[in-house]
Amino acid sequence: MRILLIEDDPKTAAFIIKGLGQEGFAVDHAADGEIGLHLASEFPFDAAVVDIMLPKRDGLSVIECLRKQQNPIPVIVLSARSSVEDRIKGLQVGADDYLMKPFAFSELLARIQALLRRASAQTDPTSLTVADLRMDLVRKKAFRADREIELQPKEFSLLEYLMRNTGRVVSKTMIMEHVWDYNFDPQTNVVETRICRLREKIDRGTEAKLIRTVRGMGYVLE
């Protein structure tokens, strides 16, 4: 999952980026409203975390612009403003949630996960299943039949993306857009390497191979 963070305070941004990275999210960071609006308009994101007090363009203006563009990205507002009027204004311009500073990272994470569940409209938002492969999204665990699969955070994110697109061929570019951030070098072979490791972990010792390479197009889990 790919998150856009628009936050001008370096310490707060570093705190969020580190925490979300450890949870397997790819995070793109913008330190002002204009860059944030550009990124949200040009690149696909699964959710955005937006501070209100930003240089060049404030967070509410960014959200209002995105909604005028018919951009449905789920947005959580971060703000030190605690009045009811401020919270109402944030929701009225198009934010989906409002979190006051200071905040606990665990609460921010829970709110992001709740937004992603609603956006994906999963009938069972806590788990994904394909054949005998099962992913527990809450406990961050994956199983093939009764065997638990040990996955690194990026491997978990990659498998989750493949499972959410079961039967659909996803290209290297699509994978990089959702699992890695936009600064990632597209010329590297990191996707191929991660797919190879993931396939080895998922399909090892089984007759049914779930992850398949579609030559010249990408990868599919089916």
Image: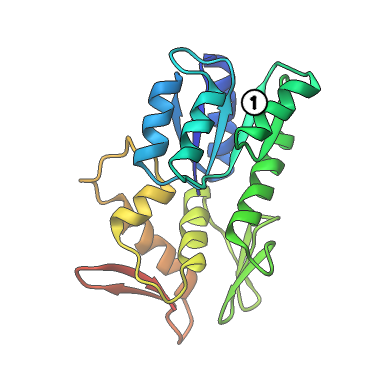
Three-letter amino acid code at disc 1? Leu
Disc 1: which residue: 78
Q: Is residue 149 above or below residue 37?
A: below
Corner quadrant of residue 94: top right
Residue positioned 49% across, 28% down in the render? 62
Residue 183: horizontal and vertical position, in percent? Answer: 32, 35
Q: Residues within 10 Å of mark 1 (few under 14, many from 20)?
A: many
Residue 103, visible in the rendered structure: no
Residue positioned 66% across, 66% down in the render? 127
Q: In the figure, is residue 39 to the left or right of 77?
A: left
Residue 169: horizontal and vertical position, in percent? Answer: 34, 70
Residue 34: horizontal and vertical position, in percent? Answer: 40, 22
Q: Residue furthest bottom?
A: 207
Q: In the figure, is residue 170 to the left or right of 155?
A: left
Residue 195, visible in the rendered structure: yes
Q: In the figure, is residue 209 to the left or right of 163?
A: left
- In the depicted view, which residue is nearer to us: 192 or 75? 75
Q: Is residue 163 above or below residue 69?
A: below
Residue positioned 47% across, 32% down in the render? 65
- In the depicted view, which residue is nearer to us: 190 or 111? 111
Q: Is residue 182 above or below residue 60?
A: below
Residue 115: horizontal and vertical position, in percent? Answer: 65, 48
Count of numbered circles in the view:
1
Residue positioned 31% across, 39% down in the render? 184
